[in-house]
Amino acid sequence: MLYLPYPMSYPMPYPMPYPMSYPMPEPMSYPMSYPTYCPMPYSMTCSMHYRTSYLFCHTYLKHCAYQSHSQDASALPGTQACTLDIAKFHQTFPVLPDHKPWLVVQGWLEDFYIDHTNPFRAACASSDAGMIANAMVDIWVAEGIWPILKYEDNLNCFQHLVPNSLFHNGEFTYAYNHDDLLKCIESLKVPWHLEKGNKVFSSSTTFFSLLWDLDLHCVSLLEAKRLKFLTCVTTFINSFSSAPCHLCDVEKIHGSLCYLTFVYPDGCSCLPSLSNFTTTFNSHEYSQCYPLHSLTSDLQ
């Protein structure tokens, strides 16, 4: 389901059998009557350079997290959620045969290999994954399973109380369970991640690397993620306090810290110096600049 050629910012060792004006089909449209369903804009992720799409994805992720927070804040007593994660979604979604000439990988000497799935970090891979996940969401909604939150390969399905229904969970009854979710889309043969996600519906679930408690209406950062982000910031400070850095070094922590302000809003006041510093590179990803002392102080 690849709708655009492989980004031309990458080397193409294979002659183009088609003109580069290869027609792009119209993006799929979905009903927006469900406020918690937020499909990623198709045209934005297909044509972006990896660095630009990296920042966009973090911004869009925060947007989806805001909608998740809205769903959490308005959750009625007994509301439960179940998170599903697709395993290695870049490498498990097949590519249309007509698009495979744009996915040729060069090996040693004159060896060439055709990629039958999306290559890792292909600009269009995230959009392709999202469009397949959109089909899953459409099936669930048609079967009465909603609301559903989706971001690429991550899905979060909710269920509300239904009096005198089939499935019991404590004192509450519901219209469907985890097995029903998978049964509805069994024909799609989706490879689910064995370690991520939930096996049952519960009032507490992990989504976007955050812990969502629907009973307490609160969101918290997982301890493993907190340590990971802390290590990234500490490494940046130790590496570039007196040495120049590249643009990508700044963007790696900038996107993460922007996302963390969803849980720690007070951190917004420390981000302007980091955001302004990215403009000093003038979009030159290979140029180097020295971080200002004020930036380091804000990170600390």
Image (cartoon, rainbow, N blue to C red):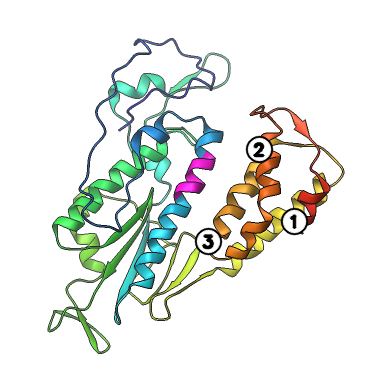
Q: Is residue 58 magenta?
A: yes
Q: Is residue 182 above or below residue 279?
A: below
On the image, numbered disc 2 is attached to which residue?
A: 248
Is 71 on the left-hand or right-hand side of 137?
right
Q: CA distance from mark 2 to mark 3?
A: 22 Å
10 Å neighbourhood of mark 3: few (<14), some, or many (≥20)? some
Residue 272 locus on image (x, y percent): 66, 49
* Contact flag, marks 1 and 2 (Cβ < 8 Å): no
Name the image quarter holding the C terminus: bottom right
Secondary structure found at label 2: helix
Instruction: Name the residue located 29 percent from the left edge and 25 percent from the top edge.
Output: 97
Looking at the rendered structure, the kind of residue marked 3 is: Phe
One can see residue 249 in this view:
no
Secondary structure under badge 3?
A: loop
In the displayed structure image, the side of residue 89 where residue 266 appears, left or right:
right
- Residue 66 percent across, percent down from the top left: 43, 59
Q: Which residue is mark 1?
A: 298
What is the span of residues highlighted in magenta in the rendered image? 54-60
Labels 2 and 3 touching (C-beta < 8 A): no
Q: Tell me the CA gap for discs 1 and 2.
A: 19 Å
Q: Residue at x 14, y 56 (%)?
A: 142
36 lies above or below 245: below
| Main SS category, magenta section | helix
Q: Nearer the viewer, residue 111 or 130?
A: 130
Name the image quarter holding residue 276.
Answer: top right
Q: Is residue 65 left or right of residue 282?
A: left
* Secondary structure at numbered mark 1: helix
Question: Which residue is the site of mark 3?
Answer: 262
Direction from residue 171 to residue 275 in the image, left or right: right
